[in-house]
Amino acid sequence: MKILKFLGLTLVGLILLTGLLLYKGDIPKDVVDARYSSPDSQFTDMGDQGRIHFRDEGNRRHFPVVLLHGANASLHTFEPWVKALKSDYRVITIDLPGHGLTGAVPSADYSTQAMLTVIKRITEHVGVNEFAIGGNSMGGGLAWRYTLAHPEQIKALILINASGTRAKNDAKSNQKSDSGSDSGSDPASDRERTNRGNSVLGFSLLRQPWFRAFAERLDPYYLIVQGLKASHYRAIVVDETLIMRYYDLTLREGTRRAILDRFKPKYVEEGGDISQITAPALIMWGMEDAVIPFAYASGFESALPHASTAYYKGVGHIPMEENPEKSVEDLIKFLETVQGE
């Protein structure tokens, strides 16, 4: 009995010690906001839908482009593109509910419909009625759903490693873009491919009840590093600046709770018939994507009636961060074509 009692106390002690080592408190909102806002940052209070952070940059008289980030990312992911676009375009980026400097919202509603409502209200707030809309991953899924819901507003659709369609077993998934564009970079080394991992571990863990029970106070640093290396094909892109941005924004007060809420089983992506989209579309995809495999691009190619493509060798899930120069060049060529019609 003494041995069992000793073992029991030892186990409890180890659990408590592990909890202390893994525990990480929140960072106050104002601290994170001061660190990651910019002179172009704006905040608008939407009541239960939250205090939404967005940026409205570039020439207000020029063609507007609305860009939406992916899950657990923020509008900062588009900063390299915005820098290249804003001399000739009006660029609106949004921190969606549960993300970035918007963070947790009072309603705790992170459904697809809630996200679409926020996009609609922001575009109304800044006074744009017709625009191009694009998004990466989750943001891409929201972009095509918004296009279906408001076809009269959308002049062009940009899908960047987007969610929401199934792979088609056809030859298109092995083709280059219409213009023959790719990243022009060398493939990653064997070591870099190993560092990448096979998938984003955090996404899998967030769906497990046992992990969710304590994840709100867990230090997310190593999960963020693993997720970023899985999302980017070349590990060299994942530097300390990128890691700390994702880390600080995740630790912003209330955001970890919002992430847990977003991953609740009740939030199932709403579907839609993307073949009904008549706006010109650009499908952009990193061919080494470990999050949404490149084969899924063919689903969009097959369904969208007016689609062109830009596919990138040696690039993973987030082309705007991994190969911003070539990807924004392809985007500008597409937008010029759209405006010339």
Image (cartoon, rainbow, N blue to C red):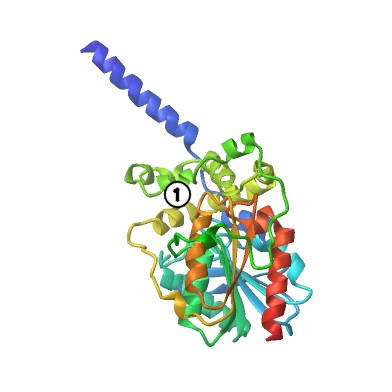
Which residue extends farthest right? Answer: 87
Q: Residue at x 52, y 82 (%)?
A: 278
In the image, 59: left or right of 121?
Answer: right
Image position of 317 with respect to 149: above or below:
above
Q: Residue 284, located in which quarter of the rendered image?
A: bottom right
Which residue extends farthest front? Answer: 171
Horizontal and vertical percent position of residue 236: 69, 42
| Within-10-Å neighbours for mark 1: few <14, some 14–19, many 20+ | some
Horizontal and vertical percent position of residue 336: 72, 78
Residue 53 visible? The answer is no
Q: Residue 65, located in which quarter of the rendered image?
A: bottom right
In the image, 165: left or right of 191?
Answer: left
Q: Please state which of residues 248 and 278 is positioned toward the viewer in this rendering.
A: 278
Which residue extends farthest left? Answer: 1
Q: Which residue is mark 1?
A: 203
Element carrying mark 1: helix
